[in-house]
Amino acid sequence: MPDTATSAPSDFREADFAPALLAWYDRHRRVLPWRAPPGQRADPYRVWLSEIMLQQTTVAAVKDYFLDFTGRWPTVADLAAAPVEEVLRAWAGLGYYARARNMHRCAAIVVERHGGVFPSDEAELRQLPGIGDYTAAAIAAIAFDRPAAVMDGNVERVMARIFAVETPLPPAKPILKTHAAALTPPLRPGDYAQAVMDLGATICTPRSPKCILCPWAAPCRARRRGIAEDLPAKLAKAAKPTRRAVAFWLTDSRGHVLLRRRPPKGMLGGMMEVPSSAWLEQPMPDLAAVLAEAPGGTGWRLLPGLVRHGFTHFDFELTVAAGRLAAPVEGGILVPPDRLGEAGLPTAMWKIARHALRHLE
């Protein structure tokens, strides 16, 4: 069957999809801290906050962060009034730190320009920092019950399998969105959006989908053809480059560790870091040249092993050089090792800290 067909399989009408899925959802919906109880309207602030946190992150990883954020900042006005450094510290460990900066900017704009009330229109939502097509549709559907076609990875997978779309991702995205829009109902669109995401997360999983439990098993073309686990197809990814650097683990006479804040733009923007040399894709230059980039320090020694971390677009390898701080560093702060957890270090920097502490015990 052609990928561009938008009609449902012949023995299952498009009008049948939503009722079947919503009946399943009413029995099996996940209980999530940002999800409104059945019959209650969702809080747009909590929907927005959860959707920003869930971008490229798992539900399990987000739950504790969401509870912490809503405990600290119960409303969008509270979040807007918080210092961005405090927000970044609370975000540390979730990754993709531009999300946190955009989230803080978005909160300020919602307060300043919209009176603390999120707009309900997708086009208006897309004008806010950090809100793209998916997040705008999710907020419009879940928070305001608008019939918006929500398309995350779970929904893409479900649509690819139901309609046996063999065009690989990302070229298949417009085809899958057409299918998703055709199935989105005018009644209970917010519940439907959450239902189809739950279906992908719990039943129509990437591996070993539980087709026997699926409310859409009968019309699923991929199941009928025995290709469900092969979909969605994806174009082969190019190999990620590797960047390398030397991290400078500098301590003063009390054993306090030198940290500094990264520039607001770029990788890990605005986050605290262990200072390092430039992140280069070519092999590391002579060590003496690299140490010249250090913010002071004497008595250098290289610690054994490497610290490795994967970013979205490149892999990162660090050698750690330990030295004694010779003089105060402008913009630097000194933190006792047992208080590093309060500094809001991103994951890559935590790996450096753990590596250094382990080898210097």
Image (tube, helix red, strand yellow):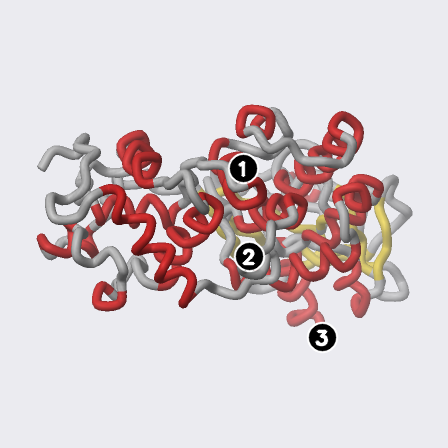
Residue drawn at x 51%, y 53% is 57
Which is closer to the viewer, label 2 or label 1?
2
Q: Are marks 2 and 1 in contact (CB under 8 Å)?
A: no
Residue at 59% over, 57% down: 36
Dot 3: what SS?
Answer: loop
Image position, residue 297 (x, y; %): 80, 50
Report the amino acid beneath label 1.
Answer: Ala
Q: Quadrant of the C terminus?
A: bottom right
Residue 215 in picture, x, y percent from top left: 27, 60
Q: Which one is earlier in the sequence, the residue at label 1 or at label 3?
A: 1
Q: Nearer the viewer, mark 1 or mark 3?
A: 1
Residue at image position (45%, 46%) is 188
Q: SS of the residue at dot 1?
A: helix
How far apart marks 2 and 3 lie (CA) works out to: 56 Å
Can residue 60 be spotted in the picture?
A: yes
Where's residue 145, x and y in %? 52, 41
Q: Nearer the viewer, mark 2 or mark 3?
A: 2
Residue density around tag 3, few if under 14, some if 14–19, many if 20 or more, within 10 Å: few
Q: Indicate the position of residue 30 as horizontal and vertical percent values.
A: 48, 64
Residue 361 bears which disc, if any?
3
Residue identifier under label 2? 39
Q: Which residue is mark 1?
A: 140
Q: Amino acid at mark 3?
A: Glu
- Label 2 amino acid? Gly
Front residue of this view, candidates 95 and 29: 29
